[in-house]
Amino acid sequence: MRYGSYSFGPGFGLTPAVKGIMLANGVVFVLQMIAGYSMVVYFGLVPQLIIHKGFIWQLVTYMFLHGTFFHILFNMFAVWMFGAELERYWGTREFIKFYFICGIGAGIMTLLTSLSSATPTIGASGAVYGILVAFAMMFPDRYIYVYFFFPVKAKYLVVFFAALEFFASWNPEQSGVAHLAHLGGMLIGYLYLKFDWRIDGFFRKFQQISSNHKQRAKQRKEEQRQRLMEEVDRILDKINKQGMESLTREEKKKLDQASHLLSENKEFKPK
């Protein structure tokens, strides 16, 4: 495939996280071939083992196992094709966070919809579908050339895949594919960007809340200071006309407050 004005060749666009994900999956696939099915049972996502045995790590490790060579080839090709640009746009740390959140979210979706299942679910497809959704949201009008010949905008392609996975999920036994995991990855990816769950998004919101709080506190302090200044002006006028003996206890207290404020803030001066 190719998209936009880019043409892909071997090794093009291998960003650090994408390279690491591809390498890790490749190494695990080789180990799988050596260890056999026992590795799938122990590290694949098996709802019964998570619920009854506490194999909670499977929500992460299942993403690195694949059933066939073409399974891992398709997933890693998609990670490379769509993930590299997202990583360049977000940064490596943010992309890794997104990848694992989508993958784990897809695993949780599988777990919740098949609590009694003893069948392992494996593959990075949940995370990959999350990446596809993110790509379509970030670059909705970017053309993707399906099979190198058919140009389709990313936003339409992801809707097509979502519909395909939704209808296929009605009869998952017939295909042996974890369609709900794919939908889970897509849903988490969408929510992640829609509600700005990104690290920099949280940081921006925190900064905005903190800034607003400081601004309101500063405004309240300024209003209090202004009221005190007005009261001091009135008291000084009273002293000029009637003398110090005419001041009440409360008025003397106000002058004392103004004196302390003046010593703390050199810019404060009664009119």
Image: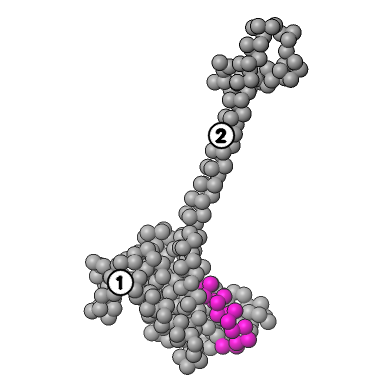
Kindly report the secondary structure that dominates the magenta region of the rendered protein: helix
Q: Foreground: 155 or 175? A: 155
Q: In the image, what residue occupies the spot 60% across and 88% down?
A: 118
Location of residue 148 by image quarter: bottom left
Location of residue 113 by image quarter: bottom right
Tell me: residue 120, above or below residue 197: below
Mark 2 and mark 1: Cα distance apart in space: 49 Å
Q: Residues within 10 Å of mark 2 (few under 14, many from 20)?
A: few
Q: Does the image show residue 164?
A: yes
Please state, as top left, top right, bottom left or bottom right, where the N terminus lies in the image: bottom left
Magenta residues, as a range?
A: 103-119
Q: In the image, what residue occupies the spot 64% across and 20% down?
A: 231
Q: Please name the amino acid that badge 2 sits on.
A: Gln
Q: Circle 2 sits in a helix, a strand or a loop, which is it?
A: helix
Q: Residues within 10 Å of mark 1 (few under 14, many from 20)?
A: some
Q: In the image, what residue occupies the spot 37% across and 60% down?
A: 88
Q: How is the image coloured?
A: one colour
Along the horizontal axis of the image, is 192 left or right of 240? left
**What residue is shown with label 1?**
153
Q: Does the image show residue 34?
A: no
